[in-house]
Amino acid sequence: MPPKPSNPSLTMSDLAKAAGVSKMTVSLALRGHQKISAETRERIRLLAEKMGYRPNPLVQTLMANLRSTRPAQYHSTIAWVTAFPTREGWCKHWVHKLYHQGAVARAAALGYKIESFWAFAPGLSGAALSRMLRARGIRGLIVPPVGVPGTRLEIEWEHFSCATIGYSFMEPRLHRAASNLHDAMSRALAECTRRGFKRIGFAIPSDTDLRVNHSWLATYLAWQQFIPKGERLPVINASGPLQDPLPAWLKKHRPEVIISPNTEFSTWLPKLGRRIPEDIGLITLSRPGNDTATTRISGISQNDVTVGEAVVDLVVAQLQHNETGVPKYPRVVLTDGFWSEGKTLRPKA
């Protein structure tokens, strides 16, 4: 039976009386609080739909403001489910550690705790992991970027409020938080154009290209359609090391700037006799914010900590609305990066 239309005159007290519980129980249940049993939360949610109860948005805003001035109280744990060949494999990637840092801080601010679980632990199936999490009362689940793009996890998704980061985990299609990679490439190209560069090249490993859902490549190829054909350079999209095709590509196409997510060009180019930025400019699309060896490279800082915060917001919103399982219409929350000047791009060509 479909829910009744909203009834503005119906109050939380009316709903509490009909459910035979207190107003506090109704309030906590509708926000998915762990103090209320799953059965009671579901019963109250169904009753609210049946009676046409809708929370007053002004009251919700007031209560949110009041709660924001109080120290956050612990609600429950959110699982951080990693899928690398080894338990600590994800920790070797600085960007993954920044995602985790943002998620931990945001979860703590909202009264939750992030705890890591290794999906590929010996003898642990997706069903067993699901049972383990449910037995501990864990209903929120985050899948950070996986080790191999296209990796699948046989988790019983219907029991969890879940979201993922980036584009390496694509099935099932969950709500996701990601960096705005289209905007990042657009900003890099705009900087080159503003400084008068004409021959702008792009290089990316094929596995990285797959991991980011071809976002950078698609934006670069689209941009090329609006420049003279003589200024269009072929992309280095190598399945092996990028430095292998680099010497011949440099000699044939004479780029003035190279855009790439790989910072290793800062060592490869000098070995080939190219001075940076005097002979050739270098822009990275993934600029580390805390690595002194590479922060001198000009490029885009992706706000990775903020992406980690955003994925927690996606999960907590589902927890508070008792939404579980694979969403019918997944949402994607994009976070813009920003240009960091560095020292590898000349002010003017």
Image (tube, grey):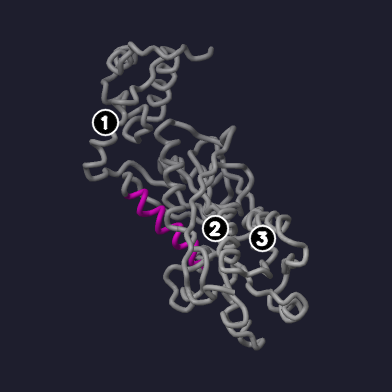
Q: In the figure, is residue 69 to the left or right of 290? A: left
- Badge 1 density bin: few <14, some 14–19, many ≥20, Cα 10 Å: few
At 32% across and 41% down in the image, what residue appears?
75
Q: What residue type is labelled 3?
A: Asp
Q: Is residue 99 magenta?
A: yes
From the viewer's perspective, is residue 50 above or below residue 187? Answer: above
Q: Mark 2 points at which residue?
A: 121
Q: Is mark 3 on a helix, strand or loop?
A: helix
Of label 3 and label 1, which has the lower sequence position? Answer: 1
C-alpha distance separating marks 3 and 1: 45 Å
Q: Name the residue under label 1.
A: 62
Q: Do the residues labelled 3 and 1 touch (CB within 8 Å)?
A: no
Q: In the figure, is residue 81 to the left or right of 85? A: left
Q: Mark 3 points at which residue?
A: 209
Q: Position of residue 264 (x, y in %)?
A: 59, 77
Q: Where is residue 58 in the image (x, y as percent from the top left)?
A: 31, 26
Q: Where is residue 229 in the image (x, y as percent from the top left)?
A: 77, 63
Q: In the figure, is residue 95 to the left or right of 264? A: left
Pick the quarter of the image with the C terminus.
Answer: bottom right
Q: Is mark 2 on a helix, strand or loop?
A: loop
Is residue 102 at least partly visible in the picture?
A: yes
At 68% across and 56% down in the image, what residue appears?
223
Q: What element carries label 1?
A: helix
From the viewer's perspective, is residue 197 above or below residue 131? Answer: below
Q: Which amino acid does label 1 sit on?
A: Leu
Q: In the figure, is residue 41 to the left or right of 191? A: left
